[in-house]
Image: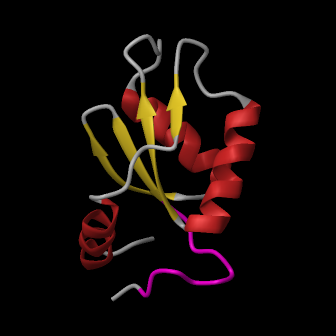
Amino acid sequence: MLTGKQKRYLRGEAHHLKAIFQVGKDGVSANQIKGILEALEAKELIKVKILDNCPEDVHHVALDLSMHTKAEVVQIIGRTIVLYKQSDERIYRLP
């Protein structure tokens, strides 16, 4: 679990990032989860955009992604989810 201070730090780091995944009308697929896992291993911190045509609630998608990838949900802002998962080669030094 991330502390409040760590989440604030990661939110600041994620501010300039662009969403590299989109969840659309089909919801979260196994291929998306695989891609997100690979991206988290490479980058540790990513954004996922939930499109307007996604039938699921943003919070439900965030929980689903968090459970399947074992990543922490750093922030949900609008229809964008910020995920963090520490990789073997640490990129971010958490406070």
Quadrant including the C terminus: bottom left
Q: Residue at x 28, y 75 (%)?
A: 9
Q: Give the colour scheme shown.
A: secondary structure
Residue drawn where x is 39% and y is 48% of the image: 18
Count how many numbered circles sit on residues in the image: 0
Q: 54 left or right of 17?
A: right
Q: Is residue 38 magenta?
A: no
Q: Position of residue 47 (x, y in %)?
A: 43, 48
Residue 92 image position (x, y, % from top left):
45, 81
Q: Quadrant of the N terminus?
A: bottom left
Q: Nearer the viewer, residue 69 or 90?
A: 90
Task: Give the residue at x 24% y 70%.
Answer: 8
Range of residues picked out in magenta: 84-93
The x, y position of residue 74, in whole percent, is 37, 58
Residue 88 spot, x, y in % from top left: 69, 81
Q: Up-down: is 28 above or below 16?
A: above
Q: Quadrant of residue 71?
A: bottom right
Residue 86 falls inside the magenta stretch: yes
Pick the residue in front: 61 or 79: 79
Q: Residue at x 54, y 67 (%)?
A: 44
Q: Is residue 5 left or right of residue 36?
A: left
The image shows residue 67, relative to residue 38, as above or below, that is above
Q: Main secondary structure of the magenta part?
A: loop
